[in-house]
Image: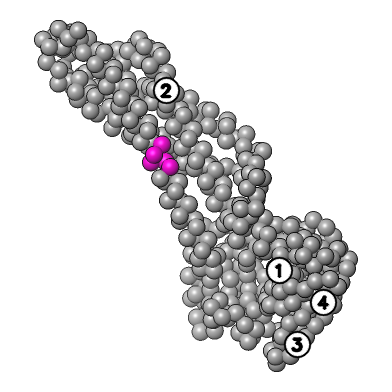
Amino acid sequence: MKMLFKIAWRNIWRNPRRSWVLITSIAVGILGYLGTIAFSRGFVMQMIETVINLQGGHLMIQPRGYYQNPRIGLKISKPERIEKILDQLTIDVNYAPFVSFQGMINSAEAATGVIIYGVDPYLEPNITIVSSSITQGRYLTAGKGGEIVIGERLAKKLKVRLGEKVVLMATDMMNNINSGAFRIVGLFHTTSPDFDRSHAFIHLNEAQAFIGYSNEITGISVRLQNEHLLETLEKTLETKLTGLPVEILTWKERNPLVVLSLEAYDAMVILIIVILFSAIAFSIANVFLMVIYERIREFGIMMANGTKPKNIVIMLFLEALLITFIGLISGFTFSVAYLSYWQHVGLDLSAFAKGLAKFGVGSHVYPEIIIQDILWGIMLITVIVLISVIYPAVKAARFKVVEAISFA
């Protein structure tokens, strides 16, 4: 085996140009594979983070039936019971109660529909990124009333600026139309234009009073410290909240269209990888077939000198593995350097910003790479190379000695 290894090593450098073509093919394949996976994961992660960061965290507890038919008549009457259960969990979570209802927001020059959220200024920043997305002014301040925070896009639509007043209108529990004036203390900007145009935030107690609630709430948003425990948390809460008229919805259950989009995107990525690796497999098989026909006489002489056909097969596989090893090292080295650069600066997709914003993705996409991707890449490339060499190697081992030696 040691002798075959030495022969294989020398053989791959007998024709360095051909060997470097193969090495480059493998390196480019690795770059294409990791690049596709990394940027796809970065894109998908931004979509998921947008949903989690803007739409109630990883999990939401709401009155049963509210998701299918959101109306203020459906409410959680004793939220303190649920909050006590959340406080006693062994899983680290942040939670925040909220009140949500639809209404109208009016300025001196325009009016539009809006989703009004009543939140706790202390707790809500642990769930959503609205407080950290403030571009002008500040977030809601505890103890102060008459404040409202809206998106920059909504402010532009209403033609209002920071410090000006707007009027909210909504129907309460008794079907009375209530209204109230609020001063804009902050404007926010997120990666979701639709969210920025349609959401406004006021204090929880003011939202409760606005629609006729006392201590009732619309729901409780829950965010995990470790997102991998989401299923465990969901099952735990389903057990502990049995008997209460509430339902537990994860971000996936609240956003089925996003989940479908992610599944379709994953399928597209798999298709790209299959096409990429198929191209690599055909190029390697083609080159090794050329190698065999160039070396028929050499194989004949080797067999005439007592080399067994299986050793010729082993030698060709060793050549393939050595080329693969060099290609993998070259490909991964370049890929890591390449992706590290884009992780710092981000891939600028400003030209497609409007379209990407519909998916909750910003103008810059940052690649995400994990160790499993590298391990899968090593395994897939190695397997593909070995499979590609099977036919050429077997063909070389089946040459007849006399015909091979006399081959011109």
Which labelled disc corresponds to residue 408?
none
Question: Which residue carries the number 1 mark?
Answer: 199
| Magenta span of residues | 272-276
The amino acid type, in three-letter code, at marker 1 is: His
* Residue appearing at x 41%, y 34% in the figure: 378
* Residue appearing at x 74%, y 57% in the figure: 189
Q: Earlier in the sequence, mark 3 or mark 4?
A: 4
Which labelled disc corresponds to residue 167?
4
- Magenta stretch secondary structure, dominant: helix
Looking at the image, is 350 positioned above or below residue 260?
above
Is residue 91 visible to us here?
Answer: yes
Say which element carries label 3: strand
The amino acid type, in three-letter code, at marker 2 is: Ile
Q: Earlier in the sequence, mark 1 or mark 2?
A: 2
Calculate the distance from the C-alpha at mark 1 to the C-alpha at mark 2: 54 Å
Left or right side of 146 for 404: left
Question: Which residue carries the number 3 mark?
Answer: 177
Front position in the image: 57 or 278: 278
Question: Which residue carries the number 2 mark?
Answer: 23
Say which element carries label 2: helix
Say which element carries label 4: strand
* Residue appearing at x 63%, y 70% in the figure: 221
Looking at the image, is 177 positioned above or below residue 385?
below
Q: Earlier in the sequence, mark 1 or mark 3?
A: 3
Say which element carries label 1: strand
In front: label 3 or label 2: 3
Question: How many other residues sit within 10 Å of disc 3, few (<14), some (14-19) or many (≥20)?
Answer: few
- Name the image colouring: one colour
**Residue 151 picture quarter:** bottom right
Q: Residue furthest bottom?
A: 174
